[in-house]
Image (cartoon, rainbow, N blue to C red):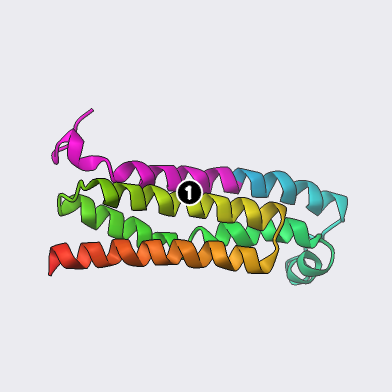
Amino acid sequence: MSSFLGLGRTQLLQPVIALAGWTFVQEIWMYATRIPAIYKYNVSFDENKVKEDKHTKIPVKVHRMADNYNNLHEQPQVFYAVAITLTLLGDNHYYTRLAAWGYVGMRLVHSLWHNLVNEPFVRFCLFSTSSVVLAGLTARAAALLF
């Protein structure tokens, strides 16, 4: 399938769709751990007690899944905007595509680390590295645009 931009000019959209897909994988993983925990730990469905029960009865490991899912709706939004902007600007440079895939890879590793290990320093390093890559992509877009 080709686009109005031409098939070769849409390669930066592949990492965008990959990260969006990973977000849905994370959502399924979150529900697969959270729903059983709600029933196992007898979390109240009373609106006034849900928040309290959620933070006192459900194990921290289950909370991490939701925290990570929320993280995928924060900084990656900037990535989506920058990658789409670069696509519209016609940037199809190999290093730009490599950086975009690098960002997606770092976010995926960050998610796995957050969910499975959650050692804060390593998680911070993973986040910081992905932030530097995103800053580079943003600088590339700014250089092409301005």
Residue at image x 73%, y 67%? 47
Q: Residues within 10 Å of mark 1 (few under 14, many from 20)?
A: some
Q: Which residue is mark 1?
A: 105
Say if 49 sits above or below 26 in the image. Answer: below
Q: Position of residue 138 (x, y in %)?
A: 29, 65
Residue at image x 82%, y 59%? 43
Residue at image x 67%, y 54%? 115
Q: Nearer the viewer, residue 115 or 49?
A: 115
Instruction: Name the quadrant of the C terminus.
Output: bottom left
Please name the amino acid that badge 1 sits on: Gly
Say if 5 sits above or below 120 in the image. Answer: above
Q: Position of residue 65 (x, y in %)?
A: 66, 55
Q: Main secondary structure of the magenta part?
A: helix
Task: Provide the residue span drawn in magenta.
Answer: 1-27
Indicate the quadrant where residue 145 lies: bottom left
Q: Position of residue 95 (x, y in %)?
A: 28, 50
Looking at the image, residue 102 sits to the left or right of residue 127; the answer is left
